[in-house]
Image (spheres, rainbow, N blue to C red):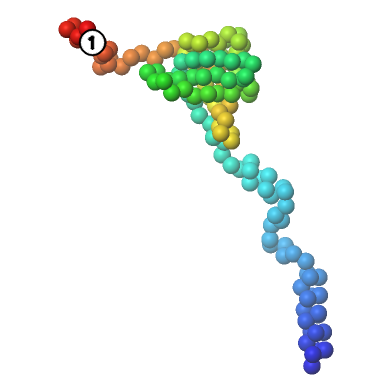
């Protein structure tokens, strides 16, 4: 009886392993993983602001929007298109630029840099002034 159970078990094992993987199941190899990574949406955006600093050796540019001290640090190693300038070396502090960027692993890579006009102050904005009697 034990021999019959052992032989029967070996036959079932041989039959299932000889059939191979089911054709309906997709292969989970490296090609399938690469396809999933390409399907992910790229994280891109645009940013308009004043150039605070440009460091060509370190491949970085600091751009801050109007009326704020917060700045975005952009890596300039992947810039492909520069509009309004002959090159990235002409961009200087104080210029207003519009950049498109791509976010990858905590780094913002500038893809394009274009000269922009300084935005106008809103019509209702009033400059803060000290009262006349205040020293």
Whether residue 72 is visible here, answered yes or no, is yes
Whether residue 48 is visible here, answered yes or no, is no
Q: Quadrant of residue 101?
A: top right
Please indicate whether residue 71 sits to the left or right of residue 77 in the image. left
Residue at 72%, 52% in the rendered image: 29
The number of numbered badges drawn on the structure is 1
Please indicate whether residue 124 sits to the left or right of residue 77 in the image. left
Q: Is residue 22 above or below residue 8?
A: above
Residue at 67%, 48% in the rendered image: 33
Residue at 36%, 13% in the rendered image: 120
Q: Nearer the viewer, residue 81 or 78?
A: 78
Q: Quadrant of residue 38?
A: top right
Please indicate whether residue 13 sits to the left or right of residue 113 in the image. right
Q: Is residue 10 above or below residue 30?
A: below
Q: Which residue is mark 1?
A: 130
Crowding at dot 1, Cα within 10 Å, few <14 / some 14-19 / many 20+, comes out as few
Position in image of residue 94 (x %, y %) = 47, 10
Residue at 68%, 61% in the rendered image: 25
Position in image of residue 57 (x %, y %) = 64, 16
Position in image of residue 71 (x %, y %) = 47, 22
Please indicate whether residue 17 sits to the left or right of residue 62 in the image. right
């Amino acid at each position: 009886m034990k021999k019959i159970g052992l032989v029967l078990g070996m036959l079932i094992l041989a039959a299932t392993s000889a059939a191979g993987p089911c054709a309906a199941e997709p292969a989970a190899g490296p090609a399938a993983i690469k396809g999933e990574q390409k399907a992910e949406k790229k994280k891109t955006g645009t940013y308009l602001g004043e150039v605070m600093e440009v460091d060509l050796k370190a491949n970085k540019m600091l751009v801050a929007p109007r009326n704020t001290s917060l700045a975005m640090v952009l890596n300039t190693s992947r810039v492909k298109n520069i509009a309004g300038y002959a090159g990235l070396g002409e961009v200087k502090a104080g210029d207003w630029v519009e950049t498109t960027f791509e976010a990858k692993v905590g780094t913002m890579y500038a893809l394009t840099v274009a000269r922009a006009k300084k935005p106008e102050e809103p019509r209702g904005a009033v400059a803060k002034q000290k009262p006349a009697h205040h020293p």
